[in-house]
């Protein structure tokens, strides 16, 4: 009986799920806490007429909204497609991220001047390249 208290039995088929279960419950608890402390009072204020629901009845830039959704969808899809052309190099991430950052920046750029376009292009090349270098080369994280 005393030896049972001091022995440990590990089920290796499910032991890797121990911490993810804890994280899920902590996130669920935090979500409920946000609902109770933030969403419930906000909805009560909406019901009293003191506040309005965001987005509903407000003006929206549909071109940028739907363009963003389309670009994000294309980004994740194309990253895998291009990544399959250059397996285990991270070039899918690098090349598709460059195009993604360029198109997103151009879509949200209001005043198109030569200086701003040069900055956008430099940023579209430099930011993904630095991220790729740090992740793929320094930390040897496999990228698509």
Image (cartoon, grey):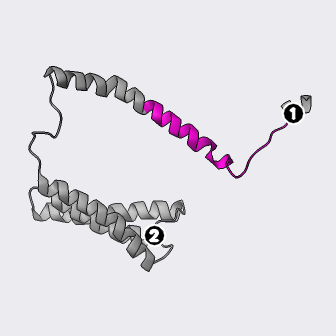
Residue at the image position 20 percent from the left and 22 percent from the top: 45
Q: Nearer the viewer, residue 138 or 64?
A: 64
Residue 38 visible within the image: yes
Residue where numbered disc 1 is placed: 4
Residue at the image position 90 percent from the left and 33 percent from the top: 3
Q: Nearer the viewer, residue 47 or 104?
A: 47
Q: Is residue 71 left or right of residue 80?
A: left
Residue 84 is covered by the magenta coloring:
no
Residue 55: percent from left, percent from top: 16, 40
Q: Nearer the viewer, residue 27 or 48?
A: 48
Residue 12 is covered by the magenta coloring:
yes
Q: Nearer the viewer, residue 21 or 82?
A: 21
Quarter containing the N terminus: top right
Magenta residues span 6-30
Q: Which mark is residue 132?
A: none
Residue 123 visible within the image: no
User: Quick check: 31 above or below 137?
Assistant: above
User: Quick check: 25 above or below 89?
Assistant: above
Quarter containing the C terminus: bottom left
Snapshot quadrant of residue 86: bottom left
2 vs 1, front mark: 1
Disc 1 residue crowd, few under 14, some 14–19, many 20+, Cα 10 Å: few
Residue 61: percent from left, percent from top: 11, 51
By secondary structure, the bulk of the magenta-drawn segment is best described as: helix
Q: Is residue 54 left or right of residue 23?
A: left
Residue at the image position 45 percent from the left and 64 percent from the top: 133
Q: Earlier in the sequence, mark 2 or mark 1?
A: 1
The residue tagged with tag 2: helix, strand or loop? loop
Residue at the image position 16 percent from the left and 60 percent from the top: 107
Residue where numbered disc 2 is placed: 90
Marks 2 and 1, Cα distance to the nearest angstrom? 50 Å
């Amino acid at each position: 009986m005393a030896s049972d208290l001091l022995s440990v039995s590990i089920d290796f088929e499910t032991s890797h799920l121990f911490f993810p279960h804890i994280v899920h419950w902590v996130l669920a608890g935090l979500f409920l806490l946000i609902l109770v402390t933030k969403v419930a009072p906000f909805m009560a204020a909406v019901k009293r007429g003191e506040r309005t629901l965001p987005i509903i009845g407000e003006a929206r830039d549909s071109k940028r909204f739907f363009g963003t959704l389309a670009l994000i969808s294309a980004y994740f899809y194309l990253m895998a497609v291009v990544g399959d052309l250059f397996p285990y190099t991270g070039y899918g991430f690098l090349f598709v991220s460059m195009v993604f950052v360029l198109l997103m920046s151009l879509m949200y750029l209001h005043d198109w001047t030569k200086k701003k376009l040069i900055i956008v292009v430099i940023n579209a090349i430099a930011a993904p390249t630095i991220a790729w270098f740090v992740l793929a080369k320094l930390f040897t994280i496999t990228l698509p």
